[in-house]
Image (tube, grey):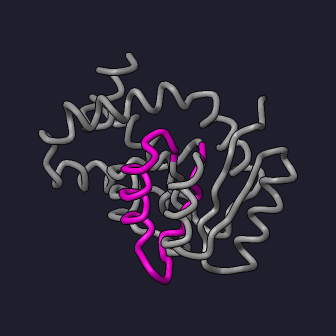
């Protein structure tokens, strides 16, 4: 795998930020970090990042609001939300904002690096799907259908993370909006 990807870690807790940065850097990725949303946005304006690892709770801005602003500046960046507070509603909102995944703290570092490698392999497909989703489907979805699908998907566990996360569980339920989207765009 080509590890020349640039990763920006946005995390206000210094020990978490440094641990994530060190471990991702040790796997050969170029890593920079920011302690708040304002600094992260300035960095994103100056340089392109392939992956944005965004803490949900930041001191100056909600992580999802940061993703929204970051994607307006750098639409090709792929965000991953990291949080210590699991919420079905937050997971759905993160996916709507364009997040690739929603990980719970403490982050499994090997799973995170594996996730980054998967994103790099599938990023073109993910970006095309995200663009087509926003263009043609999102306007027709009702919020209730979103919540019903997530509740069904999460009944047997509390928002699992990684490659077998909630997104994959929702896709496996026949008739849900994400399943219909997957079938329409990716077969």
Using the image as rendered, state which of residue 100 and residue 14 is in the foreground. Answer: 14
Looking at this rendering, what residue extends furthest in the right direction? 26
In percent of width and height, residue 127 lies at 44, 32
In the rendered view, does 179 fall on the left or right side of 158?
A: left
Q: Residue at the location (21% across, 41% down)?
A: 138
> Magenta stretch containing residue 14, yes or no?
no
Residue 35 visible in the displayed image: yes
Residue at image x 66%, y 43%? 116
Q: Residue furthest top?
A: 187
| Residue 67 belongs to the span the image colors magenta | yes
Q: Is residue 160 visible?
A: no
Q: How many marks?
A: 0
Q: Position of residue 46 (x, y in %)?
A: 56, 54
The residue lying at 77 percent from left, 51 percent from top is 110
Quadrant assignment for the N terminus: top right
Residue in the foreground of this view, choosing between 142 and 41: 41
Residue 102 coordinates in the image, percent (x, y): 50, 56
Q: Is residue 88 above or below residue 115?
A: below
Picture layout, residue 134 above or below residue 79: above
Instruction: Please state the extent of the stretch shown in magenta in the rendering.
Output: 49-78
| Foreground of the two, 166 or 55 | 55
Q: What is the quadrant of residue 12 in the picture? A: bottom right
Q: Is residue 183 above or below residue 7?
A: above
Quadrant assignment for the C terminus? top left
Judge left or right: residue 163 versus residue 89.
Answer: right
Q: Residue furthest front?
A: 46
Locate residue 125, reporting x and y percent. 48, 25
Q: Residue at x 32, y 50 (%)?
A: 96
């Amino acid at each position: 795998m080509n590890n020349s990807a640039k990763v920006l870690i946005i995390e206000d807790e210094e020990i978490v930020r440094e641990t994530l940065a060190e471990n991702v850097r040790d796997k050969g990725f170029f890593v920079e970090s920011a302690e708040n949303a304002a600094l992260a946005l300035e960095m994103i304006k100056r340089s392109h990042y392939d992956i944005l690892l965004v803490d949900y709770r930041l001191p100056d801005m909600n992580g999802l609001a940061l993703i929204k602003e970051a994607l307006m500046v750098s639409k090709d960046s792929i965000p991953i939300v990291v949080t210590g507070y699991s919420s079905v509603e937050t997971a759905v909102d993160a996916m709507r904002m364009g997040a690739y995944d929603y990980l719970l703290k403490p982050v499994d570092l090997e799973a995170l690096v594996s996730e980054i490698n998967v994103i790099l392999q599938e990023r073109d497909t993910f970006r095309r799907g995200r663009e087509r989703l926003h263009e043609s489907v999102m306007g027709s979805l009702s919020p209730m259908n979103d919540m019903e699908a997530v509740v069904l998907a999460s009944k047997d566990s509390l928002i699992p993370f990684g490659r077998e996360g909630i997104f994959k569980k929702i896709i496996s339920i026949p008739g849900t909006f994400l399943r219909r989207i997957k079938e329409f765009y990716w077969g």
